[in-house]
Image: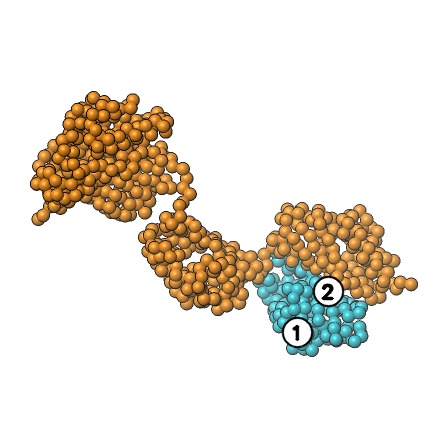
Chain colours: A orange, B cyan
Amino acid sequence: MATLQETNKARVRDYIENIINNHISTRFGEYVPPNGIDHSAPAGMPQGPAGTQMFFSMFFEGSSDVHNTIHEMIAEGDKVTIISTIAGTHDGNLMGLPGTGKKFSVLLLETVRMENGMYAERWGGLDIVTLMMQLGAMQTEDAKANVELYTQLVNTYIDGVNEHDPSKLRQAFAVDFVDHNNAQVTGLPPGAEGVVAAHDQLDDSFPDINFTVEDLGVEGDRVAIRVRATGTNTGSFYGFPPTDKHIEWTAHRILRVANGQFIEAWNEFDQVGILMQMGIIPSFTPPPNPEANKAIVLRLYEEENKGNVDIVDELMSPDFVIHGDALNPYQKGLEPLKLAARAVQDAFPDLVVTVEDIMAYGDKVVARLRWTGTHTKPFMGMPASGRKMSWTAIGTNRFENGKIVERWFNSDTFSLLQQFGIIPGGAPAEAAAPSAGLPVAEPPSAQVSDSQLDANKRIVQRFYNSIFNAVHVDELKEIMVDEFQDHGEALFGSPHGRETLGGGIVGFRGMFPESGVSIEEMIAEGDMVGVRGVMHLKHDAPWLGEATGKMLTWNGLSMFRIKDGKITDRYFNSDSLYILEQLGYWPLKK
Amino acid sequence: MSLDANKEAVRQFHRAVFVERQMDTLPSLMIDPLHDVNASGVPEPLDHLKGTLQTIFGAFPDLKAAVDDVMGEGEIVTLRLTLTGTHGGNFMGAAPTGKPFSVSAIHIFRFADSKIVERWEWVDRLGLRAQLGIQ
């Protein structure tokens, strides 16, 4: 015959396994009598079966898979102690907390006194505080203290990076620190010394490296940080040569803390982004937006007319590069650009730039510009002349990520020198029209098909290759209107009419058989084609003085207007001052 | 080893910890490290248990633990207590409130070779927080 203790334990097991674990909330009355006392009932919970039902219904509602697992039952006299675990998934409303999907598992320790197979008295319960912590509704004291400690630790680490102070890195990282991602950089020593060595390498690649913690979270013994890093790539990185570029990237680290130091970490940083910015691998840039780019170029000059030179910081990339002319040489960065703009504005206080034409295709915008102003202060060593001056330029701008990052630029430097009186000539290339002071641009041309644009480009290609280089001037009439107008620069003049131009080409090529134009780039929009080219010429005949036999090369930028398959206008600027430089006339000898 | 001897060891544990506060006698009652199911689920050095108990006495300097029941079967003994005292020191980040409290607790011990090898503990922490007015 079963002992009382065996009977009581069987009854408890039956209650837990058949009623609780089957989520049957209607049958508690079969186990808990109306006069049953729960000595550990939370405040506000009724006694008797109603209280038990309330307690377990809360779990049935909050967790569809809640389960009570018995580990031990100890019986003595009329009492049974039960060691069990209540575990489940928090997928419903539990104690006012909407489902989180989190798993929970808490011990349930209780002693019951049985009377005729019923729960007459009960003590004990589960640790609701631990349960709330598992559900994320309550932060442990340890966790609160950890946030402070871990933040200090992260600060020590970041200070160590920014101050290039290995002692701070050694303070933050344990001697036996393990970096789970150190396969990224091979050959590092283990432990904190690996961190020091890795940052030594980074310091070589980016000597002005700076880490900023943008996000920090602590859970348990782990701290997660999101770091924004910046630096100038003046040393090699992963074996790639330095680019001198300003690089920005993001890093994410999860660090585990033990005994007040980082003991292990998982690390990801945007290596692809770094290599893209260095130009090692192609970047996934958004499709170019020519209209938006044109608007940026127009705004740039509009702001410059207001004297707002600093607008370049907003509209242009810090990696900006200009391929200019002898007066505006190749330069990197925005500061030289601003300096030059301020110098011109200072010498010509009423200076106005007018955008006479603007066209765009892909990532490029070509603008035809005219500057007008009065020379009221010394400029480039020339005393103030009080002259009203005007000069033209063409600039091709390349955009990257919505900013101007590269520019090819030729101004009519020859004309400028004439107007300064440095070289004879004097009259501006084209009479300066009174300027309204604001950029003037034609409305965007009607949408032209790519095949039409290609046809226009082929016409320009034919002009240079067949007409100019191969001197098939008889073909000129097939691609140019009678009333063609050239809008050139001072050095080459502005012939009117196709016959005049054709005669000029024949004469020029006759003087210089070893000369020609190579097209570096063509872009087309609407009725316009922009060309970037390089001219070469063997100086075998007198021109700008005696023949020197030198091989001269210079860059030029042109814009052609084409109507019904024929060229009507050409605008042209070249690095004419550089021709003088190659011939030894410039810079002026003092 | 009889159940009675185990119960006597549990009473010794109670006297040493809650009456005399002589934690140094713990190693004579328990193995070290001890399997403390509540703490981490893995064996922990007895020093951890001592530290926890000392923190509790710091928070509740006048803590008393009245024995309500000692019962057992086989190698397991249950100690049911009523803890009373005043919140006179820092507890879980809360400054002392000076409030009195009375909550129940259950300690369960498993014995092997006359020493405690495993330990479970429940304290009515929800009731304690409610009585002290701690969130």
Q: How many marks?
A: 2
**Can residue A57 be seen?**
yes
Residue ID for mark 1: B32
Residue ID for mark 2: B106
**Can residue A416 be seen?**
no
Quick check: A488 left or right of A123?
Answer: left
Farthest-out residue, right: A1
Out of B1 and A483, give the one closest to the viewer: A483
Given the image, what chain letter belongs to the residue carrying mark 1?
B
SS assignment at label 2: strand
Rendered residue at 15%/41% (across/down): A538
The image quadrant that residue A513 belongs to is: top left
Residue A523: image x %, image y %? 31, 34
Judge whether A494 appears above or below A283 on screen: above
Quick check: A142 left or right of A110?
Answer: left
Rendered residue at 30%/28% (across/down): A456
Residue A297: image x %, image y %? 30, 36
Rendered residue at 64%/69% (across/down): B44
Q: Residues within 10 Å of mark 2 (few under 14, many from 20)?
A: many
Q: Which mark is residue A274?
A: none
The kind of residue tagged 2 is Ile
